[in-house]
Image (cartoon, rainbow, N blue to C red):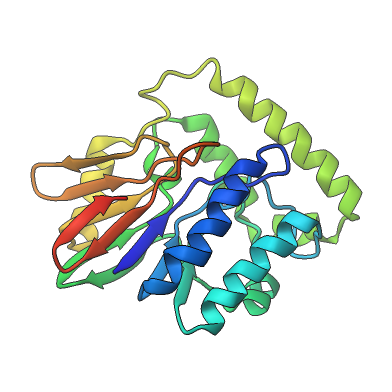
Amino acid sequence: MIYFISDLHLSESHPQITTLFLQFMRQKAPLAEAVYILGDLFDFWIGDDEQSPLIDEVKQAIRTLTASGVKCYFICGNRDFLIGKRFARETGMEILPDYQLLDLYGKKTLLCHGDTLCIDDVRYQQFRRKVHQKWRQKLFLCLPLFIRLNIANKIRAKSQKDKQSKSFEIMDVNPQFTAQKVAEFGVERLIHGHTHREHIHQEQSFTRIVLGDWRDNYASILAVDETGARFV
């Protein structure tokens, strides 16, 4: 059994979601072969030097899991793309590239966060290209923590405002581009998050599984084993 989760958006303002995550890490995750977190574990991440009781709890939960022998993998999301080597070292988690190929019980599977597939959201893609430039990231991480936090809060507020004027279609994956990406990697299944629209789509030539977001009373967890994939 392998578990896939994404879009928890952990923050102090939603403690119940943190409780759900910690329950998952204590009860379900230790029974798995591996756990894949496909981005947006945190609502925002401003650098591996950030500290808080929430971050400490999450780090400890991942460290306990990996120390027990269960592999934990992470693909960065649009909110926590600055999670880096220090976080990985302190938790035993392995950071993967934006697209990861996986032989999942005999099925060729492609993993990604999902934001790279939403090419109709032109303004976001322009923003993404800028913030993923290494020199910009290094410059940002050199700033004092309180300045980074102030910048992050402004970006988050602007993002929430922009969402109100965007259609659901623009914020969803582009079907043609997604099919091209699947064909490019030669897989028969795609697993991603980002859009928060939990569903298993049977496309023409592949299966597309969308991980849902976590809420105060709901955890979107995909379980995959030899018999197939299902939400639990």
Q: Position of residue 118 (x, y in %)?
A: 40, 37
Please indicate, yes or no, whether residue 142 appears anywhere in the rendered image.
Answer: yes
Q: Is residue 139 left or right of residue 91?
A: right
Q: How many marks?
A: 0
* Residue 124 vertical placement versus 192 (above, below): above
* Residue 141 vertical placement versus 157 (above, below): below
| Residue 34 quadrant | bottom left
* Residue 194 vertical placement versus 5 (above, below): above
Which residue lies at the image location 27% right of the left edge and 47% below the top edge? 209
Q: Is residue 78 left or right of residue 98?
A: right
Q: Relative to the observer, which residue lies in front, 218 or 96?
A: 218
Which residue lies at the image location 53% right of the left edge and 75% below the top edge? 65
Which residue lies at the image location 61% right of the left edge and 68% below the top edge? 61
Q: Is residue 188 left or right of residue 130?
A: left
* Residue 131 vertical placement versus 98 (above, below): above
Q: Relative to the observer, which residue lies in front, 105 or 56?
A: 56
Please indicate, yes or no, whether residue 79 appears anywhere in the rendered image.
Answer: no
Q: Relative to the observer, which residue lies in front, 24 or 127?
A: 24
Q: Is residue 78 left or right of residue 197?
A: right
Which residue lies at the image location 62% right of the left edge and 52% below the top edge? 80
